[in-house]
Every structure is written in C-alpha cells, then in structure tokens.
Amino acid sequence: MKHFRVPFLAFGLALTAGLISGCNGGGTPPEPSDPKTGTTSGSSGGDPKGGPLTGNIVIDGSSTVYKASAAVAESFMDVHDGMDVRVSSSGTGAGMKKLAAGEIDIAGASRPIKKDELEACTKNGIEIIEIAVGYDGLTVVVNPKNTWTNDLTVAELKKMWEPNSTVRTWKDVRPSFPDTPITFYGPGTASGTFDFFTKVIMGEEDAMRTDFQASEDDNVILNGVAGDEGGIGYFGMAYWEENKDKVKAIGIDSGDGPVLPGQETVANLSYKPLSRPEFIYVNKSALSKPGMKEFVAYYLSEEGQANIKEVGYVPFVPELYERIKKRFDAGVVGSLFMGIDGKSVDAVMTEAGY
Amino acid sequence: MISKRMPAGRRNFDRFFSVLGMISIGIGILLLIIVIVGAVKDGIHMVSPDFLTRRLSPTRPDRTGVLTPMIGSAYIVGLTILLSVPIGIAAAIYLEELTRPSRMREFIQANVSNLAGVPSIIYGILGLALFVRAFQLGQTVIAAALTMSLLVLPTVILVTREALRMVPKAYREGSIALGATPWQTLFGQILPVAFPNIITGIILSASRAIGESAPLMVIGAATYMRKPPNGLFDGFTVLPIQIYYWSSDSRRGFVEVASAAIFVLMVALLALNFFAMFLRGRARRV
Amino acid sequence: MASQAAHPFAKPRSIRVWVERGLTAICFLCALATIFVSAFILYTLVVESAEFFRTIPLKEFFGSPNWNPLMKDGEYGIRALITGTMMIAAGSAVVGVPIGLMIAIYLSEYARPAVRKIAKPALELLAGIPSVVYGYFGLTVVTPLLKMINPAITTYNAFSGSIVVGIMILPLVASLSEDAIASVPRATREAAYGLGASKAEVSLTVVLKAASSGIIASILLAISRAIGETMAVTLAAGMTPTSNIDFTKAIGTMTAYFVEVSSGDVPRFGPQYTSIFAVGLLMFLLTFGMNLLSRRLVRRIQRFG
C-alpha cells in the first residue's frame, strides 16, 4: 500500500495549528451583540461626529409586526451598512417576556401591553417607550374553493370559535351552507393576534375552542387553510395581501353590513372590529446604543412608512407620525394604550395631550 | 446426468425475476436523478455569482443571497471538524490498536455504535440543554459547533476504525518484529497507510454535518440574520435551515430561492463526495 | 525490546516511554469521552422529562388524543405524535423496503461488476442527500403529482411524507440487506443449485431465508432511521399533530414537534420546554430499542449463520 507519510505529517501539523489558533482567535466575545443577554454590553463604532453607523439591534415579538420590522430593518441596513438588526418572531407574549428580562431592545406587539407585562418590566427596572407604528386588519380567510362564504357576522364568528363550540360543519354556521367539515387554524396563545381576536370576537381574552390547529407560524396557518377545503383561519392582513391567490378573505359584518379588509377600510376603521394598531415597545436604556434612535426614527419616517405599506400594513397619516415621534423624542415612558381597544390611535393620543 | 431443461414456467419466472431486479436498480438510479433535478429545477435560473455573494434579504426574494448562511455553515462545520476529528481519531486508535479485546473495549464499542444510531435531533436536544442553557453559551456558533461535534464523533470513530482495519496485518507484525512500540508502529506504518481512508471518512462526516438542519434548529438558528456571524459567540444560520425557511415561506418567490439554495448545497456536497470517492480510489491503487 | 537500548539514535528510553504512555492515556480519555456523551444524553433526557411529568399527569400524556401545547389549557397527549410517527414509519417501509430488498438481491446475486460500479455510488449519493432537500422535493414535486391523482390531498400530507422518507431509507435497506445476503455461505447456494433450482428460486427460497435475520435487522434499522427523520417529514407532511389516521391530510410526528417548538424560539421554561425532553426520551428509547434488537439479530446470524 502507498505510504502517505509526508501528507500525514502535514495534516497532523495543520490540525494542531488549527486547534491552537481556533482556541485563541475565535474566542473573543462579540461586540456589541450578545444573543444571550442582548443588553448594551458596550458599543462599537457609532462615531457621534457622523461617521458610519455601526451597532446592533435585537428585535423580537409579534409575528405580525415581524414583517413590518423586518422590512424596515432591511431597508435601514441598506442605508446604514454597518448596522446589524436581527428580528425574530416568537409571538407577542414571548417578546414581552424577553423585553421585561432585558434580553431584547425592541418588542413588536400586535396588541397593547398588558398590565402584568408592564409590571414585570418595572420590577426589573426596565422603562419602555410605546410607539404605535401602523394599523393592521386582522383577516379571516377561507379556502378558495369555499364559494359559499363571502362574509360572516361577528355573532357567527363567535359561535364558531367560542369555547365548547358545537360547530363542526359549515352547515352549523348557516343552514344554507353545505355540511363540509370545518378545520380551524389560528395562532397559539403566545400570539398577540390570538389575544386580540379572542378579546374582540369572544369578548373575553384567551377564550377559544380548544380543537383548532395552533401554530405561531403564519405560514402554517396559511398553508393549512389553503390546502383544506373546509378550512378557516385568521392572521394579519399583510399575510393575506401577499397570498391572495391561495386563500380568500371574507367580509366581516359587525352590524353595518359586511366589510372586506383593505387599506382604506382599515385606515378609517370601518373594518370593524378587526382593525387594530400595531406597536413596538422600546427599552429606553437601549436608546443609548448606537443606531437605536436612528432606527426608530427611520421606522416612523416616510421611508419606513413606505416599507410597512409594501408589506401590507396601513400607515397612519403623516402628521400623526410627527406627533408619535415627538413623544418618542421626549422619551416618554409608559403606555397610553394599555387596556384600551376600539379607539383610533389619533383619538387616544389626542386625549392624552399629544 | 439427464440434462433436462427447466419447464417454461420456472424459466419465465426466473427471467421475470431478474428483469424485476434490473428495474429496481433502474428505479434506484432514476430516483437519484429525479430527486436532485426535481429539487433544483425551480431555482436553478436564480443561481449566479451575485446570488452567492449577496447577504440574506428576508423580505425581497430577488435581492437575497446565500452568503450569510454559507459562511455560517462553513464556520460551524469547520469548527465541528476541528473539534471532533482529533478526539475521534484518538478514540479510534485506542479502540483499534492500543487495547486487546476486553469487556471495557466491548462496552465502549457498543456504546459508539449506539451513539451512531441516535437520531440527529436528539443531539440537538442535548445541545440545547447542555451548551445553550447549562453552559450558558446561548444560541451561538460555539454551542452549535459543540453540538455538531458530538453528533459527528461516533461516525468519525467508526470510519477511522475501518480505515485502520484496512491496513494489512503484515505491516503491524513486521513492525513489532523489528522491535517497535505500538506508537512507533502507528506513526511509522499504520497511520501513513490509513491516512487517505481517514481523510475520506472525515470528508464524509463533514458532508453529513453540512446537510444537518434539525439539531441546529433546536439549538436556535436565527430566523432573520442579514450579516454573517462575527465571532464564536454570535448567532448563526446555516444553509439547510435557510432552505427550510424559504421552502415554507408562503410569500411570492421564496420557493424558487429555496431551490436555488438547494442547488448550491448539492453542488458543494457532490463535490465533496466525489473528492472522497476519488481519494478512496487512489488509496486502493496499491 | 533489547534492541532499543543499543540503538545509537534512540531517544533516551524513559522519555519515549513517558511520551507514549501519555499519548495512550489521551487516546483512552477520548474513547472514554464517548461514554460521557451517552451519559449526558440519558441524564438530560431523564431529568428534564421527570420535570415534565411532575407537571403533566401520565394519564394525560398517554390518554389524551390531542397534542396542542400552544393553547392555554394545552393538552399533552402523546398519542397524536406517535400516530404520526408510526404512519410515516409504516408508509416509508412500504415504499423503501421492497425496492431496497430487490436491489440488494440483484446486486449480490445477479449483477455484473459494471452494474455494481454504477449502482453502489448512486445509492451512496442518494443516501447523502440532505433531509431538507427531500422535504422540498416532497412539497414541490410529490404532493402536486399526488394532487392530480386525488384532489382531496392537502398541501401537507402523510402520503408525500411516506414516499419521501421511503426513498431516503431505500439505500440503507439495500446496503445492509446486501451485506446480510453476501454473508450467506456459498455452500448453501450451491446446494440449492445442485438440486436443480433456478437463480430466482435460489434467491427467493434459500438465500432470503438464510439471510432473514440480517434482512430483518436492516429493516429495523431503516425504520429506526425513518422515525428519527425530521426535516423531510416536516416539509412534506406538515406539523399538525392529530390522532386521525388519514394519509391524505397533514400529520405531526414526534420530530416535527421539535421543529414546531424551535420555529420562532424555544420557550424558556414550563411544560412547553420540558415537553421537548419527554418526547425526546420516548424517541430515544424507541430508536435505541430498535437498534439494539437489530444488532442482536445480526449477532445471531454471525453465531449460527
């Protein structure tokens, strides 16, 4: 057999060299991002005199707001190449927990912060700044082959989704419907969308039948409904807008006739009751990180508004963004929207004097 | 001996059976082609030098690229090899050359075989509990590499042992007869001869590591990561996981990107596999 | 070792002995490390599962037909996951075993070296294709084809999963069965030929019977592999656990659950976190049991074969 002494020795040397250098070289903890704590562990770059922005931002939370944040983040990084923005979508509830634990800089939420979440933040010394970023219309979708349903009343939706519901087939919803069995799809309990849906349709948060296919991943809900003739599901309008060919949106009748979700109907809140504001909650102390202030400003700017519109959100009128930005610049902490629903962002801000 | 021909029924069955066998082989080879072609046809038009050098763009399929996950993969697989190969080779040398059959050796051998059969995702779970949580390394490159090292270790040990076994006994015996110690025999005779087969084994282990996705998902690959990881303690994403995300993304255009990324992945893997086969061929030519 | 002391270029004996002893010790430790890996795996799985079972009663775990941990009053009934896993295991066996076995017989009894030279590398490559690629193939090629045959089939379905995993285990069945068949002694075959049997008859009646333990062992290993398969199953068959055995609809295997939990982020604590380990423990025991059985069978042939 052939002897490979020389290559063998070279290999051995290379391996040892690699091991040694690997142990030294790669061992420096990252600057400044540390995925396990996500706190401001010291900044790199961000020359206050106007050099290129470098830094990192960690965002997590609602899978609905994820799309907006991801679009804005990417556009932002195109402009500021040195910035590194990471966005995850673990669900509103999970995002809030991480924010309270100081593990992330920004939490996206598809519903206002809850009292116990705010308390968890203050308990850990975290101050949060609440920023509304746009409207979203929660869209109820069915399979394209479902030709019999074009709209549902809020009462019908409640009958279908409430706990201990006896609805099994479409005929149970309206006698004129065929008796195709229904499969229910929706986000799980960590989702702000879930919280919002149960609150406005059932009247009580977290109240829902238990036999639906739950997933935090909107793709799963989409594919589920798209592949199931009797399927019904719900998620943010953004997802529906991009997949109009796969699923069909139905109009919601809350007493004034059925309304389909769309940019106008959500903006003027005629798409009731499933129009809702989307929020990002910012950890105030994270604002000292380079690039943070610029990022939030970008989110609220014209470019940011264009980005979120691209992905299916409904931006506010520009002057409302001015007022929101002013409140942000002033560093006002605390929540105006906690516990409120059904009012427009404009109304709430005006009432509070902004 | 009366030479009687077999009755037609049995003869026909015989022929039928052998045709069935040939068809089966044909099916096997056909499947290989179908699976690969089927998986890359949707996206092959997207593959370009741009695609290879652009960073991830999670919102725009036409502007995305595989640079970020490729670097992540290279990083993690590189570290995995660095960590697992020395330990694996050392363990194999011990089991094969330095001990005689004994209860202890049997036990370790059986243990290695067991580990090789454990589903890869269990290693992911182990890594989550041990490296991410207990060692507090977080969802980082180093946690991923350590996990993958454990996963790949049994395979490295097994292939190295195979390679060592392929060295003819005569070499060992001749060396001992001349008064060499086991280690002198190893360094002087056995390892140089087994070397190409060991390398082949390493390459195959690496190619397996490149294709792994499930354990790394459990460790916690980033869902949105634009830039490649900077350092051991940064988040990561690897090519197979990115392919998974793209495949299940309902938005327009991402499914083709998944296919394009599969093309890149398969090219890398096929290159590695062919290189390994080539090495094996060379080593065999005595 | 008398020659060493006399050799003019030998290192002083004591240093070399110590170096060699050191190297041996290192190697021993490395080998021992594998024991620690096993120990870690078992320890982690058992300890965290114990925590899980402290919160979730066994009755619910084994009795409930639902698995929906994302709900507020989530149910953790393993039956749904096991149903999914078993469906894929059975389905993939139906797809992969017959063809794999046939290939094994042909390769060892009939094939010319030229055929072997092409077939064996092809099978190796087939086995080397990553799981995600198979998953993508299932989702974009197999499922649309199936839909043409039966429109009731949904985007994620167990047929697709079974087919794709079946292709994945095919090379494994082929190569392991081939080893088993090859180890049947020539004498057995020649005795059958001597009695006038045709090649097909010899293969089917005599060789297969003689190699049966080895073949069963290879099937067990292949099914064990199918059980542990993650990405391919998830992409092709979905991750919606259900106890209904309907191959035209989506299912959720034990492995798909891991993916489902990891998409987004793995929860930090509570039954959602520890459930990963409970399911992991079950899977580990299942695959470990099958592998052990498989090896025992192989050892049986070696002893009696």
Image (tube, coloured by chain):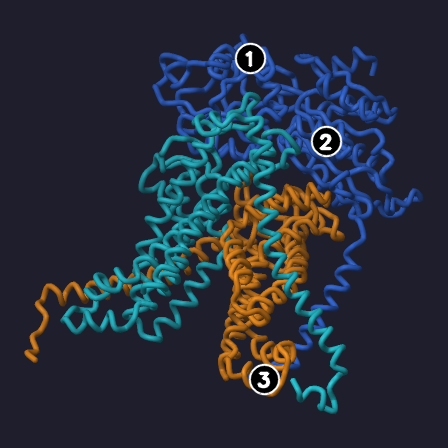
Chain colours: A blue, B orange, C cyan
Q: Is disc 3 in the same subunit as disc 1?
A: no
At x 51%, y 28%, the residue is C76
Q: Name the side, left or right, on which C136 lies relative to C214.
A: right
Foreground label between 3 and 1: 3
Q: Chain letter for mark 1, please.
A: A
In this figure, which residue is indicated by the disc labeled 3?
Answer: B175
- The residue that mark 1 highlights is A202
Apparent side of residue C98 relative to residue C137 in the rendered image (left or right): left
The percent coordinates of residue B163 (x first, y second) are 53, 72
**Which quarter of the rendered picture does the N terminus of chain B lie within?**
bottom left
Three-letter residue code for mark 1? Met
Q: Is residue C203 above or below residue A329?
A: below
The residue positioned farthest toward the top in the image shown = A255
User: Closer to us: mark 1 or mark 2?
Assistant: 2
- Extreme residue in the right direction: A49
- Using the image as rendered, state which of residue A64 and residue C288 is in the foreground: C288
Residue B83 percent across, percent down from the top left: 67, 60
Q: Quadrant of residue A305?
A: top right
- Chain bearing tag 3 is B
Q: Residue at x 56, y 32 (%)?
A: A218
Whether tag 3 and tag 1 are in contact, CB under 8 A, the answer is no
Image coordinates of residue A2 in percent, x first then y, are 55, 84
Q: Secondary structure beneath disc 2?
A: helix
Is C138 in front, or is A327? C138
Q: In this figure, which residue is indicated by the disc labeled 2?
A: A98
The reply, left or right, for residue B75 in relation to residue C204 is right
Q: CA distance from mark 3 to mark 1?
A: 83 Å
